[in-house]
Amino acid sequence: MVRNWLLSAEPESPFKCVGYTQGVNGIGAGVTIELIGYGNMNVITLYNATWAERRAIVAGERPRINRLLEDPNKGAVKEQGDEMSYEDSVKIIPQIRELCHSMNVAIFAIDSNLINEQYKTDRSEMRAMLNCTPNRTPLLVLNIRSGNTAPVGISSLDVCELLELDKLDRPWLVHAVCATELIGIVPGVKWCMQELDMI
């Protein structure tokens, strides 16, 4: 979906790649896209694993990993019986924390066919990243299904509840998106740009 959105050469695409961004300390390089009639936006894509690792996870060949996070056991000294919840243990690696400080908008993409337990992990990781962004940074959550023929999956209302978005002290929006045809992506990006105008 990211490639279709950011690097589309289709003449009917509302997006046009007009430049590239360098990121911070070699991390977070991205592209500058123009949404026709709305202006430009620098977009940095952060994947939690390599392409090969993500494929293996989807195929069930390896456990889920996230390379954007610190190892919760690294340097930790635990007393006997002192168990830390996953939500409390999640920390973003320093390079990504620095990058998050410069974010104007956060876009979080989730698979609409995840089971409820996986949303708890996503919620913790999303919050850890948001905690590193400036206050009131708008959050767009893309509720993604793979195509028009794919199962409908979880509703955007359920996504709001499972990610506990109502507890966030920042503007947020959940938008359903079709990954193959990019249906739904334009209204989400327009909302981001409108929110930036209000900050």
Image (cartoon, helix red, strand yellow):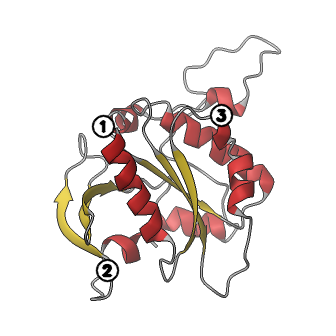
Alpha carbon separation for disc pair 1 and 3: 23 Å
Amino acid beneath label 2:
Ser
Is the C-beta separation of discs 2 and 1 under 8 Å? Answer: no
- The numbered mark at residue 8 is 2
Alpha carbon separation for disc pair 2 and 3: 36 Å
> Residue at coordinates 38% horizontally, 57% vertically from top-left?
45
Q: Is residue 196 visible?
A: yes
User: Along the line of sight, which residue is nearer the eye, 170 or 81?
Assistant: 170
Which corner quadrant holds the C terminus?
top left
Q: Position of residue 69 (x, y in %)?
A: 51, 39
User: Along the line of sight, which residue is nearer the eye, 17 or 175?
Assistant: 175
The mark that comes first in sequence, 1 or 3, is 1
Q: Position of residue 40 (x, y in %)?
A: 23, 60
Q: Position of residue 176 (x, y in %)?
A: 59, 67
Q: Position of residue 77 (x, y in %)?
A: 64, 14
> Residue at coordinates 39% horizontally, 31% vertically from top-left?
134
Q: Which residue is mark 1?
A: 102
The label nearer to you, 1 versus 3, is 3
- In the shown orientation, is residue 118 left or right of residue 17? right
> Residue at coordinates 26% horizontally, 72% vertically from top-left?
36
Q: Which residue is mark 3?
A: 167
* Quadrant of the image occupied by residue 83: top right
The mark that comes first in sequence, 2 or 1, is 2
In the rendered image of this protein, does residue 23 appear above or below residue 188?
A: above
Query: Judging from the image, what secondary structure is the residue with disc 1 in?
Result: loop
Q: Residue furthest front?
A: 198
User: Along the line of sight, which residue is nearer the eye, 12 or 42?
Assistant: 12
Q: Is residue 70 visible?
A: no
Amino acid beneath label 1:
Ser
Q: Residues within 10 Å of mark 3 (few under 14, many from 20)?
A: few
- In the shown orientation, is residue 5 left or right of residue 76? left
Is the C-beta separation of discs 2 and 3 under 8 Å? Answer: no
